Amino acid sequence: MTKTNRWTSLLLLVSTAVQAQSAGLLPAQPGDLVPARARAVDRAVPAAIERMPLAYAQPLAADAALTAEPAIHRAESREYWQRVDAAALRQGYPLALTSAGALILLSPTPSAAAPDAAQIRIVRGAERATLDQAGEALADTAALRAAGMQVATGALGFRLRDGYEADAALQVEGARGEYLLHVAEPRSHQLLTLSARRDTLHAGDTVEVDLALEGGARIGHAAALLVAPDGNAFDLDLRSDGTTARGSVRIPDAVAATAGLWDVRTTVAANDGTRAFQRDARTAIAVSVPTARIAAARRDGKAGRGTTTIDVDLDVASAGRYEARGVLYGTDAQGRLVPAAAAQSAAWFEPGSGRLRLAFPASAAGLSAPFELRDLRLNDQTVPALLERRARALRIER
């Protein structure tokens, strides 16, 4: 490398360092959602969306219990779903049960015949018990909907009496078409848990999930799908050690910036040493296209006395209404950083540069510097969607 090239490289490094420092933002932490760049998308904007700038702020109690790191949802399942055709039901479809008191819900698809309670039998060896003998708490479609369940017309639910949990099969005389069988075992020790590593991701990111089977059984096979709001599905690559499984799949870059949660749907075939059974679990994640990003944040030194104002500069790729919000922490008499105030600001922006101003009122607790801006979020209110989230965003020493 020539002397000239070395000087050029050094100047570029210095320039990059100065730009990073001027941005004011603290380095991203594990768990933060930070886009590498803003991406333009072709989308329709609702005509009724608000265009006027709005801002809001309020002081917070110093002892307010706040967290900038969202808790990851842990789905728990003692249940499974299975599509069963009429031939299997007429013959007797085995119920994979691990405990007494199972709840059975049989729902016809639109082309299937509604099940008749009088034609349902619980088969166990040579025994063919009616629902009056083997079931209780029978509920039809009207009763299920009155209880808040969204079920198909013709759905029928009941609970198996104790004693029918081993080697039982569900038989439906006169079954026609295809049915959805839902089996829940509230008293079972065999519990499947599912959690995603992140609750919100960007298009192009990788979804990572963790599965665990509690209760002593072993996983024989596991499968998982990531299902988009439009119904497109993507297989997760799952690897299991027998009691746990981990899976991942990359979200396509060409994801439309539309509202809706993505489903992670998992199913596990397991065995407790004496019988085989199934567990299904689902969880949801949010996927967004970062149509804007936070380019910089800094304190406005010209703000009025008692008010801490922070300017949040945006890089906007797609026209829309964007909102910034955050929580300001201040230092108390014991030198602890405690909540001082919360603020948010929203406005309409065309592609290019933009600025949102967070004006934090003075804390009633009389807090002083150093201050810290935490839980800084950028939301796209056009969709809506979370675009960026930083647990610790800015440090203000004085």
Image (cartoon, rainbow, N blue to C red):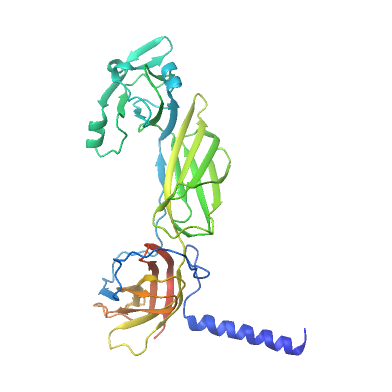
Q: Is residue 338 above or below residue 282?
A: below
Q: Nearer the viewer, residue 191 or 157?
A: 157
Q: Nearer the viewer, residue 269 or 59?
A: 269
Q: Nearer the viewer, residue 3 or 319?
A: 319
Q: Is residue 120 above or below residue 218?
A: above
Q: Quadrant of residue 116?
A: top left
Q: Nearer the viewer, residue 310 or 352?
A: 352
Residue 278 point in image, percent of width and height:
47, 32
In what quadrant of the picture does the N terminus appear?
bottom right
Q: Quadrant of residue 372?
A: bottom left
Q: Quadrant of residue 109?
A: top left
The residue that appears at 44% across and 27% down in the rendered structure is: 84
Q: Is residue 78 above or below residue 312?
A: above
Residue 310 point in image, percent of width and height:
37, 81
- Residue lying furthest right in this view? 2
Q: Is residue 195 left or right of residue 48?
A: right
The residue that appears at 27% across and 17% down in the rendered structure is: 132
The residue that appears at 41% across and 25% down in the rendered structure is: 177
Specify whether residue 2 is in view: yes
Residue 236 point in image, percent of width and height:
55, 46
